[in-house]
Amino acid sequence: MIYTRLATARWSFNLIVLMGFLFVGWGVQCHAQSKWQPDKPVEVIVTTAAGGGNDRGARLMQKIWQEAKLLDRVAVVNKVGGGGAVAYAYAAQNPGDAHRVVAARTGLLSNNLLGISPLNYTEMTPLAMIGSETMALVVRADSPIRSLKDLIARWKADPQSVSISLGGSRGSTTHYVIALLAKAGGVDPRRLKLLTFGGASEAMTNLLGGHIDMMSTAMNLAVEQHKAGKVRVIGTATTRRTWALPDVPTLKDQGFDIVVPAWTIVMGAKGLTPAQIAYWEELLERAVNDEAWKKALQEDSVEWVFMKSEPTREFLRKDYENIRGLLREIGMEK
């Protein structure tokens, strides 16, 4: 992901560069070229409790690997807490050991920048990017805010006039979307009325109940409510309209060149060898090309992405610097 200079308030995902990194020719059998093999049970660590998004994805991968007889001894381990900090610390604690990996989200970067965790992403090994979740701005169906133009006008008249849920925490992907949009519209993002709840589900309940005016969230949480006419998704932070809600314009469609994907990257401990990295690249590539995986992504409105270790490392370097710049600008960097 390549972002424009923060001073211009434009946050954009360079799809052409990303597509150059995508590896789609995966016809070789998964372990044919790997010299390293696990010699004990493998753990896939997730940051959410059983049933959460990362948990479902990890268990689907586990099923794909086991049914294809690629990896039998694999367990999904839930390590909840600290916005993922507990899971990341657990996955990173045995340098050189490739038997433990974690499905990481943006918190891997922001936790360090916010002072939540001393662990920096550079203390781990990126193995592959495997998905990108669509972020959306959502209001009630009866809201007078029908577009980003309406929202910016309200903000300019009074930045505190729109109460906005960021889900569970500030300094997260949901916060980035709001802050970048405000900046692009000439509004100070530090003056907005931003709220946090126990999570996105609680925020949706408050939105439907009329207790807040808007929420920034993963789009899959709003699709059914939008289709039922209970809420309105007024924009998505994607490069193009999503298949799930083709009637909803992107932020770019409305004149704001802002794209903020909520990626998932599989990380291993520090110091993994090229052979260990190659093993995981092949295993993960096999999973994301499985039809069951692609179907699950569609159901959750997640974009299909696969990026191998080295381009993922460069992606993380750029993402870290741009998130740091934004958090510094809104006064949250520690």
Image (cartoon, helix red, strand yellow):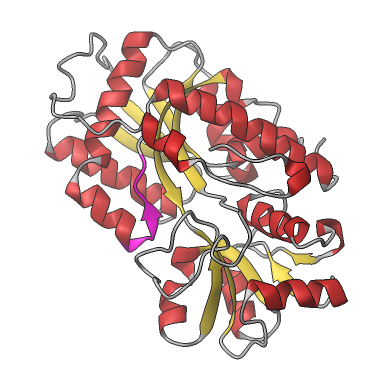
Q: At which x and y percent is residue 104?
A: 50, 37
Q: In this view of the protein, can residue 296 be seen by the observer?
A: yes
Give residue 3's quadrant in the image.
top right
Q: At which x and y percent is residue 164?
A: 71, 70
Q: At which x and y percent is residue 308?
A: 37, 26
Of residues 199 and 229, the one drawn nearer to the viewer in this rendering: 229
Q: Quadrant of the C terminus?
A: top right
Q: Which residue: 27% across, 47% down? A: 60
- Is 116 placed left or right of 88 in the picture? right
Examine the structure image and report whether residue 204 is included in the region drawn in magenta. Answer: no
Q: At which x and y percent is residue 114?
A: 75, 39
Q: Which residue: 63% across, 59% down? A: 256
Magenta-drawn segment:
299-305
- Is 172 placed left or right of 276 in the picture? right
Q: Which residue: 58% across, 63% down? A: 251
Q: In this view of the protein, can residue 41 be seen by the observer?
A: no
Q: Which residue: 62% across, 77% down? A: 147
Examine the structure image and report whether residue 304 is included in the region drawn in magenta. Answer: yes
Instruction: Identify whether 210 is placed above or below 30.
Output: below
Instruction: Identify whether 100 is placed above or below 95.
Output: below
- Is 9 placed left or right of 265 in the picture? right
Of residues 252 and 327, the one drawn nearer to the viewer in this rendering: 252
Q: In this view, which residue lies farthest toward the bottom?
A: 142
- Is 8 placed left or right of 140 in the picture? right
